[in-house]
Image (cartoon, rainbow, N blue to C red):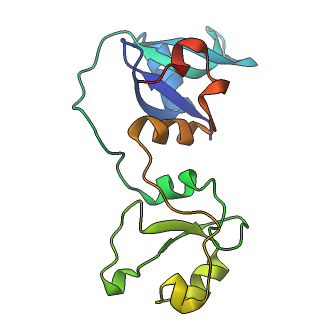
Amino acid sequence: MRETLVLNASFEPLSTVSLRRAVVLVMQDKAVVEQAHPGLRIRAAAMDIPVPQVIRLRRYVRVPFRQRAPWSRRGVLVRDRHRCAYCGRRATTVDHLVPRSRGGADSWLNTVAACAQDNQFKADRTPEQAGMRLLTQPFEPTPADALLLALGVRDRAGLPEWLARPA
């Protein structure tokens, strides 16, 4: 499913939503399409709109300041681009470096994406105890970076000039 970036009325990134939710916001006149997928349109009997890639809310929404991106299993898979941290194959699970049974937390720095085979092999051990080496080190993304990763944007160069500016 395509993800659509939602900007506040002040052009600051807020979140990502599904394509369906983005179209509903545009149809309810709560948002405008700032950037669309080239050549793609949604057509119906009474409407014809471009497929939104970035939408902007018409009214400003006050949000509390977030210093940290919230941890989630989906977020870890997106951060690691669905690649296993041990072998590089497609990852479908999240592995805790320090297992939860040994006090390991659900945190950005303690979790990596892993394929099911490597996750089962590592089991209830640390990577060192299992003799496994990490191909990439886990990191904690900023809230803005988490949004870009969710959209599949690897760097800000692929974004429009008005959105590529750092926050």
Apparent side of residue 134 relative to residue 106 in the rendered image (left or right): right
Q: Residue at x 51, y 28 (%)?
A: 5
Quadrant in which residue 88 is drawn: bottom right
Quadrant in which residue 25 is drawn: top left
Q: In this view, does 77 lie above or below 144?
A: below
User: Looking at this view, is 31 or 103 the one in front?
Assistant: 103
Apparent side of residue 78 relative to residue 135 in the rendered image (left or right): left
Image location (x, y in percent) of residue 62: 23, 22
Q: Is residue 22 above or below residue 49?
A: below
User: Looking at this view, is 44 or 33 the one in front?
Assistant: 33
Quarter in which the N terminus is drawn: top right
Image location (x, y in percent) of residue 147: 48, 37
User: Looking at this view, is 125 or 128 the one in front?
Assistant: 128
Quarter in which the C terminus is drawn: top left
Q: In this view, does 48 lie above or below 72?
A: above
Q: Residue at x 33, y 71 (%)?
A: 105
Image location (x, y in percent) of residue 145: 48, 38
Quadrant in which residue 152 is drawn: top right
